[in-house]
Amino acid sequence: MNTQDRVALAIKDVVSNMMNKVMNRVLIEDPFIKENHHAAKPLYAALVPDEIFKGSHFERRFVTPFGSVWEKLAMVVALEAHGHCSKGHSVHGVVGDESLRRIQEILNTLEHNTKKIKPDWEAELKYIKQGGGLPIPVNVTCDIFIDSRETNKKYAFELKGPLPNSDQTKVSKEKMFKLLAMNPKQIDYAFYALPYNPYGKKEDYKWTFPMRWFDMQKDSSVLIGDEFWDLIGGTGTYSNFIKEVNLIGKEYRERIYREFLEIEPPKNFDDNLLK
C-alpha cells in the first residue's frame, strides 16, 4: 500500500474501534433500561418520552471516549507519513528573560486590547526573538509532536477542537512563542491547528474566541482543516479523512437507529456528512 492507502486504513481503524466500544457499551455493558429510568425519575418519565432520555444515555457514553479522537487520528496519520509522532511530548530548552517578558507583554496587550490591535504572528515572533536576555530554563508540553523522518524537521502542534475557547487559545499561543524562542533551537515549526472548519473555507472562519489571539485567516502559524491534515499526512489526507468518516458514519448511524433506538432509519438518515 502507498502512504495514502495506509493513512486511510489508519483513520478507519481508529474511528471504527472507538465506535465499536461505544456500541458494545450502550447495547451490552450499560444499556438504557426504561424501567430503571421510570423508577428513578417518575416525573420526568411522565412528562417526556423515553426516547429523549435514551438519546441522552447514548450521548454521555459517546462523548467521553471521543474526547481525544482528534489527537488519536492525528497520531496514526502522522506515524504513517512521518515515521514518528507522540502526544503530550515535553520540549526542554532555554529562553532569554527579556524574550519571556515580551511574550507576556504581547499576551497582555491582546487580552486587554483597548487600542484594538490586531494579532500579527510574524511581527510578534520577531519582536520576541530579538529580546534575548539571561537564559531561563523552560519546559513546554505539546499536544502533538512530530520528529519527521521524511523532512528531518520537528513540528509541534497545539491541536484544539473546531470551536476553541479564548483561555485555551491564549495558553496555546504562549506555548508556541516559548517553543520558537528557545535558543538553541529545539523545534522547527509550531502550529495552532483546528482539525475541522465548520464554516467551510478558511476565509469564512468566524468563531470569535481564537480570533482574539490569532489572525485566523492570515497567520502562518494557524492551520485549519485540510491545511493541518495534508501537512501531517501528505496531499490528499484531508479528502481521505472526510471519505472514511462519512463511510463509517453511514454504517454506524444505521446501526444506532436499528439496534439502539430500535426504529427504522429515516430516508435522509445519512445526510449529515462532513464536507
Image: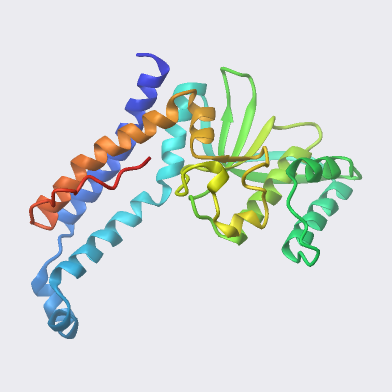
For the N terminus, the quadrant is top left
Q: Position of residue 35 (x, y in %)?
A: 8, 73
Residue farthest bottom in this picture: 43
Which residue sits at x=89%, y=40%?
Answer: 130
Q: In front: 210, or 34?
A: 210
Q: Position of residue 34 (x, y in %)?
A: 10, 70
Which residue sits at x=46%, y=36%?
Answer: 74
Residue farthest top in this picture: 1
From the viewer's perspective, is residue 274 above or below residue 79? below
Q: Position of residue 6 (x, y in %)?
A: 37, 21
Which residue sits at x=48%, y=50%?
Answer: 161
Q: Is residue 202 visible?
A: yes
Q: Is residue 159 visible?
A: no
For the C terminus, the quadrant is top left
Q: Position of residue 157 (x, y in %)?
A: 59, 39
Q: In front: 274, or 74?
A: 274
Q: Quadrant of residue 52?
A: bottom left
Which residue sits at x=76%, y=31%?
Answer: 185
Left or right, 99 with reference to 246: right
Left or right, 37 with reference to 212: left
Left or right, 228 with reference to 106: left
